[in-house]
Image (spheres, rainbow, N blue to C red):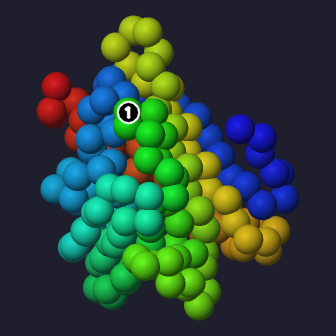
Amino acid sequence: MILDPDTDLSFTRSIAAPPELLFECWTTPEHIRHFFVPKPHKVTACEIDLRVGGRFNTTFEVEGAEMQNNGVWLEVVPNRRLVFTDGYSEGWKPAPDPFMTAIVEFEDDGKGGTTYTATARHRSAEAKKSHEAMGFYDGWGTVVTQLEDYAKTLL
């Protein structure tokens, strides 16, 4: 994938869990609750209809405030790639103020683990800079560490 340095944020990490398990964690509401936001924040609700155009809705509790994030899946390639956005909600209803499109890729490393790449694509350079300033690398990095730790409990 070609990244646009003006609008995209991305990183790659090695995870000691197979792609199939990470994909299952990303696509199962019960699993999402264990890693999807940096602790001590938490996911309080998650709805997934795993198909292109299907809902990917999450509700978070952040410092006592509830935050709702509704979106849809744009691409689902089992055990390899997930693409979702908050640019639309179910039924292809455009969001009034979309934040990003996320691309999560799982590549088998041939040693029982996964090369994991997370990319956030933004509608403008300003939106990218805002996400970076909010702590994209620390926040998403923490989420990946939580994902790996949680996935290891399922092995």
Residue in the picture at 15% in, 33% down: 154
Q: Is residue 133 visible?
A: no
Q: What residue type is labelled 1?
A: Asn
Q: Name which quarter of the figure residue 36 lies in.
A: bottom left
**Position of 83 relative to 97 (above/below):** above
Image vertical order of residue 39 relative to residue 31, above or below: below
- Residue labelled with disc 1: 79
Q: In this view, does 8 lie to the left or right of 38?
A: right
Closer to the camera, 99 or 1? 1
Q: How far across and how far down the image is residue 60, in percent?
A: 32, 75
Q: Which residue lies furthest to the top in this view?
A: 111
Of residues 101 and 148, which is closer to you in this image?
A: 101
Residue at image coords 83%, 51% = 5
The image position of residue 128, as x and y in percent, is 72, 66
Please name the residue shown 31% across and 86% down the image. 66
**Residue sitting nearer the eye, 51 or 149:** 51
Left or right: residue 82 versus residue 117 is: left
- Taking the image as shown, residue 128 lies to the left or right of residue 141, namely right
Q: Relative to 153, does residue 62 appear above or below in the rendering?
A: below
Can you give x and y, in whole percent of width and height, for residue 63 in the image?
A: 34, 81
What residue appears at the point 53 percent right and 66 percent down from the top-left corner?
85
The reply, left or right, for residue 81 in relation to residue 97 is: left
Which quadrant does the C terminus fall into? top left
Tell me the SS state at disc 1: loop
The N terminus is located in which quarter?
top right
Neighbour class for label 1 at 10 Å: few (<14), some, many (≥20)?
A: some
Q: Can residue 24 be seen in this view?
A: yes
Residue 129, x across and y down, in percent: 75, 68
